[in-house]
Amino acid sequence: MLHSLAYIPGFALAGFVIVLLVGSRLGDPKAGWVATLAIAGSFVCSVLTFSGLMGRTSTGRSYVETLFTWIPVGSLHVTVSLLADPLSITMALFVTGVSTLIHLYAIGYMKRDRDFSKFFLYFNLFVFSMLMLVLSDNFVLTFLGWEGVGACSYFLISYFFERPSAATAGKFAFIVNRIGDFGFLMAMFLLFDHTRTLSYQGVFSKTAPPSCPSGPGGTLGHCVAQLSSGTLEAVCLLLFLGAVGKSAQLPLSLWLADAMEGPTPVSALIHAATMVTAGVYLMARVSPLLHLAPVASWVIAIVGVTTAFVAATIGTSQDDIKKVLAYSTVSQLGYMMLGVGSGAYVAAIFLMVTHAFYKALLFLGSGSVIHAMGDEQDIKKMGGLRRYMPITSVTFIIGWLSIAGVPPFSGFWSKGDVLDGAYTKSPILWAVGAVTAILTAYYMGREVYLVFFGEPRFKEVALNHGGDASTGHGHGGEPHEPTWHMWVPLVVLAFLAVVAGLLNLPFTSGLGYLEHWLTPVFGTTHLALSTSAKWLLAGSDAVLALAGVAIAWSIWRRAWDRPELEPNFLRSSWGLYKVYEYLVSKPAQAFANFAQATVETRIIDGTVNATGGLVAWTGLRLRKLQSGYVRNYALAIALGMAGVLIYLVVRAG
């Protein structure tokens, strides 16, 4: 009998199997509805599990369900076990909830696509992999889900593989994530070598002495670990390398912008609620280790805030509607890492949840615009769309105000929590984060004004060109709102983006629901800030957000082309592609050329050819022994027998 917790990933897996077996016969839209209902089933099961945990005491909000033994090899004993605790269920709730809305949206967006059922096949497998990642109770099973989302992202990013740019983007994402996977694997090897276990509970319990609270259910405090500080730092830094690849932190961040080659629902799924948050989740999950590794925490905080700032500056000069959002995602992930590195784990998860709502909203809104514009993605060729697409424009603006951190939208509360944690870590980290907040409000405002305000510029675009035959997006006439499959998720996500801040309101302990809920995982982590300091920082956050909005309004409400504000340095992503080219691509190409010319041609091929030549040379000379005369063969036999007899006599003597 299937365990109750297993129903959460089980529904997604069942949807994948059904679409795999009969999806082509179901076709459009039935295959999409099967996939969507499967993920909705996972969401319902997540809600039921959440309700069950809520009914328990704080110390009892954690249990493990073991399905079967997976790897019983010597001292390595790995089971397929699922962990239900406040962190894993929080992840499962917003992953399945947002994914259900994106699936519904995709039914309309991918209509008449020639590989409609295959698209939803990948979608269901992706969500299943993500659920296995967040629900597993050990590093190995987490790594299985980790690799699953990586493989599915390759399939989805390069979905339109006939386009060379899409195929290249898929390969780029896949290769970059392998770098992070190396760090994850090395961390697991190191942990197993020292603890002889790879379950989270086992590692946490053997990392710290019994007097030190550890693992889910413990309270973070000052204690001395059984492992050496060097080993703990190495493990945390190696795990962070895995997170850098998956969550697109510098210097491995460029793959995420290139991933915009995938269909817009893919961008929403990967960059809002699932894959890119996996790295942040992993670092939050190993918080008992990270708490004992101060050097690693500083590295995470510095890399996070640097990523947030650099990505925000790049976003100010992009013209592709989806690439602006992609760099926005990188920047927001940097904020989450800043929260983790500052020890504000609840704030990082809070931002992750709210980000899932408003970033999914923004991506899906951009998809509606692209759909209405006949696949045009250049924001300089849009303008005035609020007159034609009122639902999309209103919901997109709500997403903008949320990500900008304008009160009372959800981003104000969640980003404010992260900045509060950064301030307690270092005022310099807070200052960089504050500047980034202004940039966020500015570049998202720039996109909103260029797309929805001003005079329409799309009349110069051939809207009735027929569109892309592979997607069925082409249409004639003026831009218009999409079908209900696409605008209903926008409305729901807009509502969530407004009210999600209620999950963890500051200042009053009774309103910090998310903090109380996650206490069994992260313990009691009160910030060393007075109430007056919190109010002052909150006021600063609001002023910064409104300043960014005001700057965007003053510059872009009428203008649509300001090249002096969009330098090539930022358009080219700080030259990071050139850095990759000179430090990675060209040396790798030179080594490949050397290996082809020297190692393969001279050594490998030379050895093979020399072996063949030796055999031929030997054969030519041995042929002389095959004369065809019986007397020669008889002589050879006689000589051989004489030799054997002499040998035996000598041995006997």
Image (spheres, rainbow, N blue to C red):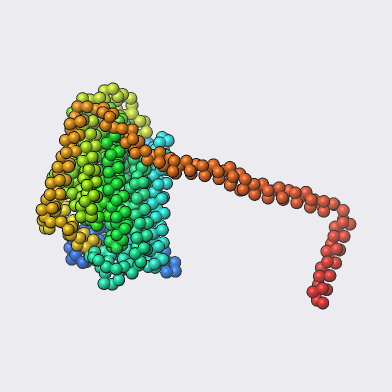
Q: Is residue 353 above or below residue 312?
A: below
Residue extending farthest to the top is 460
Q: In this view, does 457 lie above or below 65?
A: above
Q: Which quadrant of the structure image shows residue 467?
A: top left
How many marks do you count on the picture?
A: 0
Closest to the observer: 139 or 423?
423
Residue 521 pos. (x, y %):
24, 61
Q: Which residue is drawn at 24% across and 43% down?
A: 436
- From this viewpoint, is residue 636 visible? yes
- From this viewpoint, is residue 377 visible? no
Q: Which residue is drawn at 41% across and 66% down?
A: 193
Residue 497 pos. (x, y %):
18, 45
For the N terminus, the quadrant is bottom left
For the C terminus, the quadrant is bottom right
Closest to the observer: 228 or 89?
228
Q: Which quadrant of the structure image shows residue 597?
A: top right
Closest to the observer: 194 or 37?
194
Q: Going by the image, does 301 lie left or right of 641?
A: left
Q: Residue at x 22, y 47 (%)?
A: 431
Residue 645 pos. (x, y %):
83, 70
Residue extending farthest to the bottom is 653
Residue 350 pos. (x, y %):
21, 52
Closest to the observer: 269 or 503?
503
